Image (cartoon, rainbow, N blue to C red):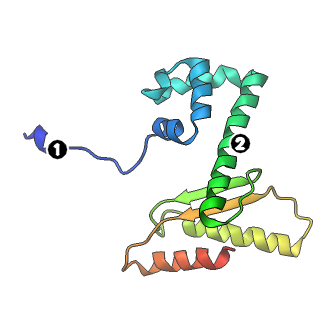
Amino acid sequence: MFPSRFNNKTNGVTPRRWLLAANPALAKLITDAIGDEWITDLAELHRILPLADDVNFRDSFRQAKHDAKARFARWVKSSTGRVLDPESIFDCQIKRIHEYKRQLLNVLQIIVHYNRLRSNPNFDAPPRTFLFAGKAAPAYTLAKLIIKLIYNVGP
């Protein structure tokens, strides 16, 4: 009845806008390979599937991703003093802390990995860096306990 009264907002960022901002080199590689239609239509990314067999494209893809991780690691070090290994798998959860959003399961996974390494020092696991960010509502006691657990498990 009153369409002018509604103004839609999203609390998220589209994957294509995220890619353009977070990894311009990878966005450029994709644009050079398939054109820029993917920027407004994410479904266009299906056009890179045939390039999975292209060794040069795969190498450039990996390099762009690695360079972005190294840039992020440098930023973390300069802003916090923490050192991240860009060769490790970055396992990130950046969102509001809720018991249903899996942060608790993720921190329990860290504890399982730690216990496996303690019981078997030869346990062959790829190096991982776990990153958490978020906040809890002031009265959300369980979410605040999850934050405390993450903090206590961390370095």
Question: Residue 37 vs residue 7: left or right?
Answer: right
- Mark 2: which secondary structure? helix
Sequence-wise, the earlier of marks 2 and 1 is 1
Instruction: Give the residue drawn at x 71%, y 73%.
Output: 111
Please state the horizontal and vertical placement of residue 109, each as a whole percent of the image.
Answer: 68, 67
Question: Is 28 drawn above or below residue 131 in the view shown?
Answer: above
- Mark 1: which secondary structure? loop
Type of amino acid under label 2: His
Q: Residues within 10 Å of mark 2 (few under 14, many from 20)?
A: some
Q: Residues within 10 Å of mark 1 (few under 14, many from 20)?
A: few
Query: Disc 2 and disc 1: Cα gap in Å?
Result: 42 Å
Q: Quadrant of the N terminus?
A: top left
The residue wearing badge 2 is 66
Question: Is 41 drawn above or below residue 104 in the view shown?
Answer: above
Which of the two marks, 2 or 1, is nearer to us in this view? 2
| Residue occupying the far left of the picture | 1
Q: Which mark is residue 143?
A: none
Instruction: Give the residue drawn at x 60%, y 76%.
Output: 151
Q: Quadrant of the C terminus?
A: bottom right
Residue 6 sits in quarter: top left
Please state the horizontal and vertical placement of residue 28, each as a whole percent of the image.
Answer: 58, 27
Residue 60 sits in quarter: top right
Q: Which mark is residue 6?
A: 1
Instruction: Give the residue drawn at x 61%, y 33%.
Output: 25
Instruction: Give the residue drawn at x 48%, y 65%.
Output: 134
Question: Is 23 drawn above or below residue 108 in the view shown?
Answer: above
